[in-house]
Amino acid sequence: MNQITHHSTEDLLAAYDEAPLNLRYWTSYAILTIGIALDYFDFFIVGFLIAVVGPRWHLTYGQSSIILLIGGVGGIVGALVGGSLGDLWGRKTILVISSFICAAAAGSIALIPEGSWEIFAALRFVVGFALGGTVTPFNTLLVECTPTRYRTIMSSLGIVFPSAGSLIAALTSATLLGTLGWRGVAALGVAPAVIGVLVIFLVPESVRWLVGRGRYVEARTQVAKLRGVPAEELPLPTAVATPPNARLADLYTRPGVFWLTLIAWIGASTADYAIQLWGPTMFSMLLRISVREAAIYMVYLALFGITGKIGFAFLANWIGRRKSGMVHGYGIAVTLAAAACLHSVVVAGFPIFVLLVIFSCLFVVGGIGNLAPYAVEAYGVKLGSRAAGLGQASNGIGRIAGPLSLALVAGTGNLLSPAATAAAVFPTFLFLAGCGLAIGLVFTFLAPETHGVPIAQGDGEPARGT
């Protein structure tokens, strides 16, 4: 009499964790990372567009800030919606839909009538919504699709590519703004549509999500392709999967991780987007140079951010997520406090403030490489997309708070001017340094270690570790 063999989901996932990083993995990884770079290009290019159209359209700080921060509002909505639907419909489906929406909205900015800042703002809301919906499955897929032994470094290195989007925006503005004009540069925002098509055909759904939904045959097929073996050689789970849900309230089953995610993301993105989105205007005003020349400084800023993210990927793989989060937060606090206190110091005719802001991006931008995968790792697969959504919604709050902080200090009714910008630097950058301090504190007191710990499949299971 034949004996029926019962396999658990852990048996199949163990086989998945033993897989090498083969061509199939690297193809998916390349498409995902290039795609997120193009999405972030669409988001960051607005800083250069505002620096051009702001004076031309006689925009106030308030009007300019609405255009800059409305993307953060859209990002909050998009992250929460995309996070919930990602746990129901799958990570891949949400990624494809969001990529097409982002491309359509960003490209349409090139067509708006002169002076129509309200339409500009409305389209920026849609771009933010789509970015929130794109980066949520991106972060989740990076974590879930990488075997545990490679997860910390590969998921963190993937977060380099949003900074590459910032670099592409700066390089594009520095080299093409004079040739194509602001409308031509805005029209380049349709690029993510190409990535959406590639994801449809070349990027597989998360094996861990398929297992969590009870789609064991599909999951085993994906594992077999990654392992390069016949599917029949791998175990087929016989367990009954729990029904999926999309309740955001389930995230509070881990209150410590919930508050850490909320506070750390708000602090990190507030500092990041204040610098990224006001940078072109701030540098051009303080240095009294053209927007195109200011874009060159933003290239250096982006390069330091990329260097920081690469550094934090290796740092997290060496000392763990928790200690890396502490370095992230306290590093921001020290460098931005120094920039605030030395904002009026000039060496050889050059403001030391500019150099300190560029250097601070090693921490301001770099530490996000450690932060972005953290919530997905800590919460587990069944809450993974919602956890990423919580992080990106908090990121969206920072997209609002960052641009708004400088505008509020300078006075939202004031026209953009060197005097108004200079007066706002000291208090604004002390505030941003405080955001970094908050990140360091929550990682010190609230963070469980996730480095090297297999991702839990169940709702709210704490990660094992110290």
Image: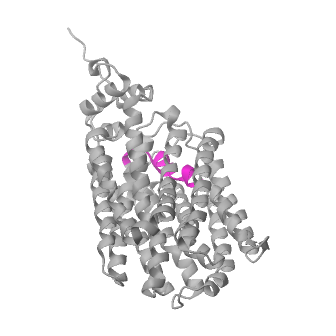
Residue 458, placed above or below residue 228: below
State which quadrant residue 185 falls in: bottom left
Looking at the image, residue 152 sits to the left or right of residue 63; the answer is right
Instruction: Please give left or right for residue 324 compared with residue 262 in the image.
Output: right
The magenta segment? 366-382
In the picture, the quarter occupied by the N terminus is: top left
Secondary structure of the magenta portion, mostly? helix
What residue is shown at x 55% (from left), y 71% (from top)?
280
Residue 255 lies, in percent from the top left, at: 50, 58
Residue pictured at 58% horizontal, 67% vertical? 271
Q: Does the magenta stretch include residue 368?
A: yes
User: Whole-percent x and y of residue 286?
Assistant: 65, 78
Q: What residue is shown at x 45% (from left), y 25% (from top)?
A: 18
The image's colour scheme reads one colour
Residue 128 visible in the shown view: no
Quadrant for residue 218, please give it.
Answer: top left
